[in-house]
Image: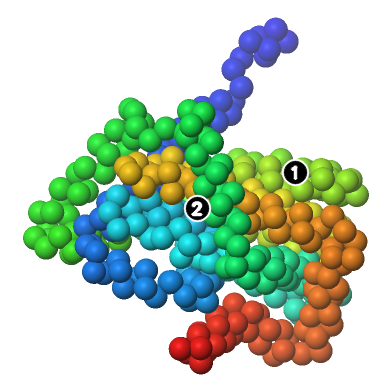
Amino acid sequence: MSLARQSPPQDSPSAVTRLVTVLLLLFAFLVGVRGLGEGFKLLGGDFLQLIFTTTDNPFIGLVVGILATTIVQSSSVTTSMIVGLVAAPESPLPLSNAVPMIMGANIGTTVTATVVSLAHMGRREEFERAFPVAVCHDVFNYLTVLLLLPLELTTGFLQRIAVGLGRLLEGAGGFHYDGPFLAALSATLGPVEQLAAWLFPAAQAQGTALIAFAGGLIFTSLFLLVKVLRSVVRTRVELLVTNVLGSSAVLSMLVGVAVTVMVQSSSITTTLLVPLAAAGLLRLEQALPITIGANIGTTVTALLAALAVSGPNAIVGLEIALVHLMFNLTGTVMIYPLKVTRSVPLRLARHLTTLALRSRKLTLFWVAALFYGVPALLLFVNQLLN
């Protein structure tokens, strides 16, 4: 018996390997964010000015955020790239242009759970329980944008809060932009920059190649990171979610935050709720606070991305990450605490489910309209206004 106690755990090497893998993937992700800024620096002011002129319209910025996130199936990838854009050493994306893009990313990230819920269409009772839990995330995030985008355009309050918090963190020494860590990122990126310079004589071509490399690295590292973390904490995540059922809303939100931070993906958290709801283990009212917590937890990725940027505009990278955080916190405070406002996304989710149950074609149309029809409508409105 004593020998058994003295024996090392059989899974220790596996745990160490996974930890090293997670750290390497995080480092690769931050290298990608840094490479993105360097790539945009090489593109030159004319090309960037075209992007900035386009996204100067908040409707276009919102559409870009929605479509980019639905294409890559990850708001973390989109927000990380936005951090790189606003913190670019030269010709950075204006913070005001980036705010609607962040809001659009929040909408685009909800598509995964909605698509997963469609797998239950063939079983009416399961679908009736699963679909409202999935679509409630869509409705909540759309409502948040409808409330906060006009408010932000008229007052700029999210930017003001983020700028104030950013200066506070910088002044308190809680956020640094130099040191051995950033030197390690630059050293790792150096050979890639040299290879791009050797392959492409023109600076713009080098910049395009570097952006393509950085974007691919961000996407791949986050994809693998989510996969590794999910395999490590899957059982713990399921236990956390099931144990919190029936508890207070605050605790449910904290679990949503914790799970999302652990797996680095709000889509994983919300997708996990769908089969639980289909099995009758989770009610819509119980799912909503966990979903809101996932919204808040996913902002950690942009804050991590802000660690990888440096130079004169580095503080703006932190500010847009803080905009993402404040956007989700403000939406939560505005909608969830009061029963009258909290019931709005719940009622809308149930109403949409009633419509979806009438026809599979109607369901597919609703999903397509939500993520592609609305952006098309915004583009149409923009054309009319111009």
What is the tally of numbered marks visible in this picture? 2
For mark 2, does the 10 Å Cα neighbourhood hold few (<14), some (14 to 19), or many (20 or more) residues?
A: many
Which of the marked residues, 2 or 1, is nearer the chain's N terminus?
Answer: 1
Q: Is residue 326 visible?
A: yes
Percent from the top left, x then y, of residue 255? Answer: 75, 44
Residue 47, above or below 79: below
Front tag of 2 and 1: 2
Quarter where residue 182 is shown: top left
Towards the viewer: 148 or 346: 148
Quarter of the image where the N terminus is located? top right
Tell whether label 1 touches label 2 (CB within 8 Å): no
Percent from the top left, x then y, of residue 244? Answer: 84, 45
Q: Residue at x 48, y 45 (%)?
A: 318
Percent from the top left, x then y, of residue 194? Answer: 15, 48
Q: Residue at x 84, y 63 (%)?
A: 342
Mark 2 residue type: Ile
Percent from the top left, x then y, of residue 62? Answer: 53, 72
Disc 1, SS: helix
Towards the viewer: 148 or 281: 148
Quarter where residue 283 is shown: bottom right
Towards the viewer: 251 or 357: 251
Towards the viewer: 232 or 5: 232
Q: Which residue is mark 1?
A: 254
Mark 1 residue type: Leu
Q: How is the image coloured?
A: rainbow
For mark 1, does the 10 Å Cα neighbourhood hold few (<14), some (14 to 19), or many (20 or more) residues?
A: some
Cα–Cα gap, marks 2 and 1: 23 Å
Q: Is residue 109 visible?
A: no
Quarter where residue 235 is shown: top right
Most distant residue in the top direction: 2
